[in-house]
Amino acid sequence: MIEPLQDIVRHWGMDPTSFKTLLLHPNVTEVKAGGKTFYLKRSVYSSFENRMEELYLTDYLMSHHLNVESPLLTCSQLPYVKEGEQIYSLYKALEGTPLKEWSADSLTNAGAYLATLHLILKDYRCHYETKGWEIESHVTEWVKELGTESIGIRGLVILSKMKGWEHSYRCLPHQFVHSDYNSGNILMQGEEVCGIIDFERIRTAPRITDIGYFLAGMLKAVPKEKKDESMKWILAFMKGYERHAPLTAGEKRILPSIVILFLLQYAFLTYHQGYSEAGASFMDFIEELLASAHFHGVFQYEKEKLE
């Protein structure tokens, strides 16, 4: 495997000294060359247009002083190398470490950084057609596939209790969003955010979709013994976001449903992967959230509480 990768990396004029595939991300290989660290990413379902749009968009963000991961140009001045059906892009490693330890300060800063990103992306004009983030269809597809099983039936009941959010959500302004804003893609130095990586999956959607995705990922990963702290951490993240880009009353009203939708996706995926007990336990957690006035109320805070 090393020799083909060496040939690929030489398209960037590099003579690499080592390769190491990341255990949790088998499509990403750490490359050492010239005393520096780079990441070679392999995509199967990408395209010329996707890779060019990523280049234009990340250049745009850097011109607005955001520290983001951007594809390097090959000797042919392209941001990728195509090998058969696979596309490879190379990125210089950014400083910082992924957000692993949550605290009120780190989450507030993560929320603020996302708000800044959204404000800048709001004015971005794409060069190629960009896909919409169809979060509702993803859930309904899972329900259809698992409809005769217990978890699918429970999911259908949850969705029936959430009726009414769809029309309001579709009427919200759509813009470019990151669509993978999670703790692994947020780089930190201490409690401060110092960069964002992985813009390969850029999509268009209402901005609260990015917020709901992050919060669902955070809730999914909260240890059982710390579930009681979840609402405090949600509030910390929202505090940072709202200081830069206040949400409308309509966005706040819909946001809990978006969080639940992403949690349902996680539950269905977990079950589909063979972890039926974990999937069922996750559904218990979702049902508790849906019935929790505290969960819905945490998004309806007054502005004074954010100061």
Image (cartoon, grey):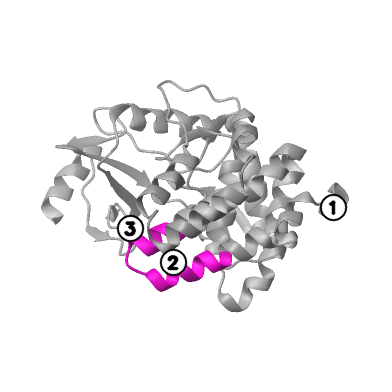
Boundaries of the magenta span: 266-285
Comparing 256 with 202, the one in front is 256
| First of labels 2, 1 by sequence position | 2
Residue 95 falls within the magenta-colored stretch: no
Q: Kindly report the secondary structure that dominates the magenta region of the rendered protein.
A: helix
Is 7 located above or below residue 104 in the figure? above
Q: Residue furthest front?
A: 148
Q: Residue at x 49, y 42 (%)?
A: 135
Q: Is residue 144 left or right of residue 40?
A: right
Amino acid carrying label 1: it is Glu
| First of labels 1, 3 by sequence position | 3
Q: Residues within 10 Å of mark 3 (few under 14, many from 20)?
A: few
Q: CA distance from mark 3 to mark 2?
A: 23 Å
Say which element carries label 3. loop
Which residue corresponds to mark 2?
A: 279
Say which element carries label 2. helix
| First of labels 3, 2 by sequence position | 3
In the image, which disc is placed on residue 307?
1
Res 64 quadrant in image: top right
In the image, which disc is placed on residue 25?
3
Q: Is residue 248 left or right of residue 135?
A: right
Q: CA distance from mark 2 to mark 1?
A: 38 Å
